[in-house]
Image (cartoon, grey):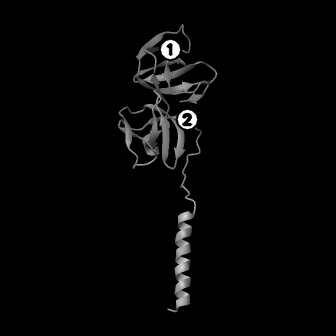
Amino acid sequence: MPQVLRKFLYRFMALAILGSLTAPIVASAQESGLPIPRFVALRSDKVFLRSGPGLRYPKVWIYHRRNMPMEVVSEFDTWRKVRDWEGSEGWVHQSLLIGSRHVIVTDENITLYSAADKNARKIALVSASVIGRIEDCPATVDWCQLRFGDFEGWAPRHGFWGIYEGENVEG
């Protein structure tokens, strides 16, 4: 191979390698397009919370509560940065989250009523840390229809976490 051609090939290869090293790194963002922040729930009764968006990041917490409500505060690729009701944050893979809406009781207890009225019949007293499903939560009233196991009823929009103030959720 002539020396001129060899020098050309070496320079071309050097420039190609240098160009690939200095080119900006573009993440393959597969963001959901859904609003942020938003509420989701844990799909499984064993979910790892990681310090960063990937399997190489250490586990910082293990959740053992299926349907635990979480707030998505950021997205990166297939990873969601979430916050729990106590304020802990970390990253969870999207496959471990579901879009169904749940709440967790944060007060000592909440009362479920047969209707969205404090004078309605009391159905159940639900204790702190119990997880329930949102059946209906009209934005026009300060009450939500919730289900905790076999008990379904209405509760004022306080004493539980998993819904935004004035948010409308249809079951």
Looking at this rendering, what residue extends furthest in the right direction?
Answer: 140
- Packing grade of label 2 (10 A; few <14, some 14-19, many >=20) is some
Q: Is residue 31 left or right of residue 123?
A: right
Q: Position of residue 98 (x, y in %)?
A: 47, 39
Vertically, is 114 above or below 20? Answer: above
| Kind of residue at badge 1 | Ser
Q: Residue furthest bottom?
A: 2
- Between 54 and 113, which is closer to the camera in this rendering? 54
Identify the image quadrant of residue 136.
top right
Which residue is label 1 attached to?
114
In depth, the one of 19 and 160 nearer the eye is 19
Residue 33 at x, y percent in the picture: 59, 45
Front position in the image: 31 or 144:
31
The tag on residue 51 is none
Query: Which of 4 and 27 lies nearest the eye of the viewer?
Result: 4
Instruction: Check whether the beta carbons of the residues at disc 2 and disc 1 lie within 8 A of each other.
Output: no
| Residue at the disc numbered 2 | 38
Q: Secondary structure at mark 1?
A: loop
Q: Residue at x 37, y 31 (%)?
A: 65
Q: Residues within 10 Å of mark 1 (few under 14, many from 20)?
A: some
Q: Is residue 48 above or below residue 18?
A: above
**Residue 49, horizontal then vertical, whole percent:** 41, 39
